[in-house]
């Protein structure tokens, strides 16, 4: 089951992402990366918010669901290290502007 992500018109975009999963939430992105999923890119919207982009697969959808169901199993150290690394990437991108 593939989910579609809609970005609101007020953000200046109107796309259906079928092959991509985009999320702004650092904790979910960190959990996904710590679980072995790769961030394809980090892209800004017109408001200056940064979105993490992942390949949209069944496995990724299951991982996101397990995050929200609180059944995802992660090493706390791996999650913490991953979150720190992603925060550094966000900081680097914001400083380039």
Image (tube, rainbow, N blue to C red):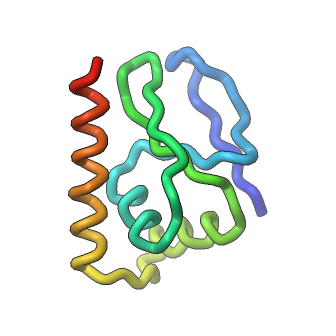
Query: In the rendered image, which quarter is residue 14 located in?
Result: top right
Q: Position of residue 17 (x, y in %)?
A: 70, 40
Horizontal relation, residue 49 to residue 13: left or right: left
Q: Is 21 in front, or is 1?
A: 21
Against 30, residue 75 (above or below) is below
Quarter of the image with the N terminus in it: bottom right
Q: Is 70 in front, or is 95?
A: 95
Horizontal relation, residue 93 to residue 7: left or right: left
Q: Residue at x 51, y 59 (%)?
A: 38
Q: Position of residue 22 (x, y in %)?
A: 55, 44
Quarter of the image with the C terminus in it: top left
Residue at the extreme right:
1
Q: Residue at x 22, y 78 (%)?
A: 77
Q: Is 33 in front, or is 27?
A: 33
**So how many labels did they put on this image?**
0
Against 7, residue 60 (above or below) is below
Query: In the rendered image, which quarter is residue 16 located in?
Result: top right
Q: Residue at x 39, y 19 (%)?
A: 47
Q: Is 1 in front, or is 45?
A: 45
Q: Position of residue 26 (x, y in %)?
A: 34, 51
Against 27, residue 59 (above or below) is below
Q: Residue at x 23, y 67 (%)?
A: 81
């Amino acid at each position: 089951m593939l989910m579609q992500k809609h970005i609101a018109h007020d953000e200046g975009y109107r796309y259906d992402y079928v092959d991509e999963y985009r999320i702004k939430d650092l904790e979910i992105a960190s959990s996904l990366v710590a679980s072995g999923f790769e961030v394809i890119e980090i892209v800004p919207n017109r408001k200056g918010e940064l979105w993490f982009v992942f390949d949209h697969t069944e496995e990724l959808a299951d991982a996101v669901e397990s995050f929200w169901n609180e059944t995802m199993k992660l090493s706390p150290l791996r999650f913490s290290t991953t979150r720190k690394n992603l925060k550094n990437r966000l900081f680097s991108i914001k400083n380039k502007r």
